[in-house]
Protein backbone atom coordinates (compact mmCIF):
# COMPACT_ATOMS: atom_id res chain seq x y z
CA UNK A 1 0.00 0.00 0.00
CA UNK A 2 1.42 3.41 -0.94
CA UNK A 3 1.88 6.36 1.41
CA UNK A 4 -0.94 8.28 -0.30
CA UNK A 5 -3.34 5.34 0.17
CA UNK A 6 -2.34 4.71 3.79
CA UNK A 7 -2.31 8.18 5.35
CA UNK A 8 -5.42 10.36 5.65
CA UNK A 9 -3.28 13.52 5.60
CA UNK A 10 -2.82 15.41 2.34
CA UNK A 11 -0.38 18.15 1.29
CA UNK A 12 0.89 20.13 3.11
CA UNK A 13 0.29 17.95 6.19
CA UNK A 14 1.55 14.66 4.77
CA UNK A 15 5.12 14.78 6.01
CA UNK A 16 6.26 11.37 4.77
CA UNK A 17 7.38 11.05 1.13
CA UNK A 18 8.40 7.38 0.89
CA UNK A 19 8.19 4.37 3.20
CA UNK A 20 9.55 0.85 3.04
CA UNK A 21 10.08 -2.28 5.08
CA UNK A 22 8.68 -4.28 8.01
CA UNK A 23 10.27 -1.68 10.25
CA UNK A 24 8.96 1.43 8.53
CA UNK A 25 11.61 3.83 7.30
CA UNK A 26 10.19 7.10 5.97
CA UNK A 27 11.94 9.99 4.22
CA UNK A 28 11.24 13.74 4.10
CA UNK A 29 13.15 16.73 2.84
CA UNK A 30 12.28 19.86 4.84
CA UNK A 31 11.22 22.66 2.51
CA UNK A 32 10.62 26.33 3.22
CA UNK A 33 6.81 25.98 3.43
CA UNK A 34 6.86 25.57 7.23
CA UNK A 35 9.58 28.13 7.88
CA UNK A 36 7.70 31.43 7.66
CA UNK A 37 9.60 33.78 9.99
CA UNK A 38 11.79 31.28 11.80
CA UNK A 39 14.87 29.34 10.68
CA UNK A 40 13.70 26.10 12.32
CA UNK A 41 10.86 23.65 11.66
CA UNK A 42 8.32 23.68 14.52
CA UNK A 43 9.13 20.73 16.84
CA UNK A 44 5.53 19.49 16.75
CA UNK A 45 6.02 18.68 13.06
CA UNK A 46 8.93 16.39 13.99
CA UNK A 47 6.51 14.53 16.27
CA UNK A 48 3.91 14.46 13.50
CA UNK A 49 6.38 12.97 11.01
CA UNK A 50 7.28 10.16 13.44
CA UNK A 51 3.56 9.59 14.14
CA UNK A 52 2.90 9.24 10.40
CA UNK A 53 5.72 6.66 10.14
CA UNK A 54 4.18 4.77 13.08
CA UNK A 55 0.78 4.92 11.37
CA UNK A 56 2.27 3.47 8.17
CA UNK A 57 3.70 0.56 10.17
CA UNK A 58 0.21 -0.54 11.27
CA UNK A 59 -1.55 0.47 8.05
CA UNK A 60 0.82 -1.80 6.06
CA UNK A 61 -0.84 -4.79 7.78
CA UNK A 62 -4.26 -3.75 6.47
CA UNK A 63 -7.27 -4.05 8.74
CA UNK A 64 -8.99 -1.34 10.75
CA UNK A 65 -8.16 2.38 10.55
CA UNK A 66 -5.31 3.56 12.78
CA UNK A 67 -5.69 6.33 15.39
CA UNK A 68 -3.16 8.04 17.64
CA UNK A 69 -3.96 7.25 21.28
CA UNK A 70 -0.92 8.76 22.98
CA UNK A 71 2.69 9.98 22.90
CA UNK A 72 5.16 9.14 25.66
CA UNK A 73 8.77 10.09 26.29
CA UNK A 74 9.09 12.54 23.41
CA UNK A 75 12.56 14.01 23.15
CA UNK A 76 13.54 16.70 20.64
CA UNK A 77 17.34 16.95 20.52
CA UNK A 78 18.11 19.44 17.74
CA UNK A 79 16.32 22.01 15.55
CA UNK A 80 15.35 21.03 12.00
CA UNK A 81 16.14 23.43 9.18
CA UNK A 82 15.22 23.88 5.51
CA UNK A 83 17.09 21.43 3.31
CA UNK A 84 17.43 18.77 6.03
CA UNK A 85 16.90 15.23 4.73
CA UNK A 86 15.14 13.39 7.56
CA UNK A 87 14.80 9.67 8.11
CA UNK A 88 11.96 8.52 10.38
CA UNK A 89 12.09 4.96 11.68
CA UNK A 90 9.22 3.21 13.45
CA UNK A 91 9.16 -0.27 14.95
CA UNK A 92 6.51 -2.18 16.86
CA UNK A 93 7.51 -2.81 20.50
CA UNK A 94 4.35 -4.42 21.88
CA UNK A 95 0.61 -4.66 21.83
CA UNK A 96 -2.18 -5.17 24.33
CA UNK A 97 -5.83 -5.41 23.43
CA UNK A 98 -6.68 -2.93 20.69
CA UNK A 99 -3.51 -0.87 21.35
CA UNK A 100 -0.05 -1.13 19.79
CA UNK A 101 3.09 0.53 21.12
CA UNK A 102 5.55 1.85 18.54
CA UNK A 103 9.01 3.32 19.11
CA UNK A 104 10.00 6.00 16.60
CA UNK A 105 13.09 8.08 15.91
CA UNK A 106 14.03 10.86 13.52
CA UNK A 107 17.56 11.10 12.12
CA UNK A 108 19.48 13.69 10.12
CA UNK A 109 22.81 12.62 8.60
CA UNK A 110 23.05 9.69 11.04
CA UNK A 111 22.39 11.90 14.09
CA UNK A 112 19.23 11.21 16.10
CA UNK A 113 17.32 14.50 16.39
CA UNK A 114 14.04 13.23 17.93
CA UNK A 115 12.64 10.18 19.75
CA UNK A 116 9.15 9.23 20.94
CA UNK A 117 6.97 6.27 21.89
CA UNK A 118 3.52 6.19 20.34
CA UNK A 119 0.39 4.36 21.40
CA UNK A 120 -1.85 3.57 18.42
CA UNK A 121 -5.35 2.13 18.33
CA UNK A 122 -6.69 0.07 15.45
CA UNK A 123 -4.94 -1.59 12.54
CA UNK A 124 -3.94 -5.24 12.67
CA UNK A 125 -1.97 -6.36 15.71
CA UNK A 126 0.68 -9.10 15.82
Image: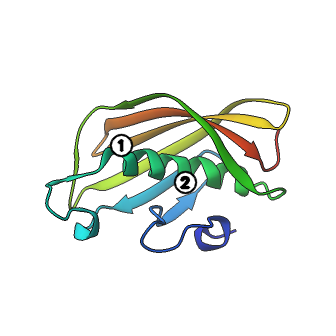
Q: In which quarter of the image is residue 113?
A: top left
- Classify residue 5 as left or right of residue 33: right
Tell me the element at label 1.
strand
Q: Quadrant of the C terminus?
A: top right
Q: How far apart are marks 1 and 2 (CA)?
A: 15 Å
Q: Quadrant of residue 43?
A: top left
Q: Tell us which disc is closer to us: 1 or 2.
A: 2
Residue drawn at point x = 60 percent, y = 73 percent: 4
Vertical comparison of 96 with 22: above or below: above
Reading the image, the residue beneath label 2 is 52
Q: In which quarter of the image is residue 120?
A: top right
Residue 118 percent coordinates (x, y): 59, 36
Q: Looking at the picture, tell me which residue is in the foreground, 27 or 51.
A: 51
Residue drawn at point x = 62 percent, y = 67 percent: 8
Residue 17 percent coordinates (x, y): 46, 67
Q: Quadrant of the N terminus?
A: bottom right
Residue drawn at point x = 44 percent, y = 62 percent: 15
Q: Looking at the picture, tell me which residue is in the foreground, 42 or 93.
A: 42
Contact (Cβ within 8 Å) of mark 1 with mark 2: no
Tell me the element at label 2.
helix
Please rate how many residues cluster around mark 1, counting C-alpha atoms within 10 Å: few if below 14, some from 14 to 19, many from 20: some
Please rate how many residues cluster around mark 2, counting C-alpha atoms within 10 Å: few if below 14, some from 14 to 19, many from 20: many
Reading the image, the residue beneath label 1 is 107
Vertical comparison of 8 with 80: above or below: below
Q: Which residue lies furthest to the top in this view?
A: 73
Vertical comparison of 109 with 19: above or below: above
Amino acid sequence: MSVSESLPQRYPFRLVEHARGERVVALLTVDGHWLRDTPALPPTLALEMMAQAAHLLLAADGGAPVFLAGIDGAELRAPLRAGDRLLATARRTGSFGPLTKVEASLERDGETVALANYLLAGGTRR
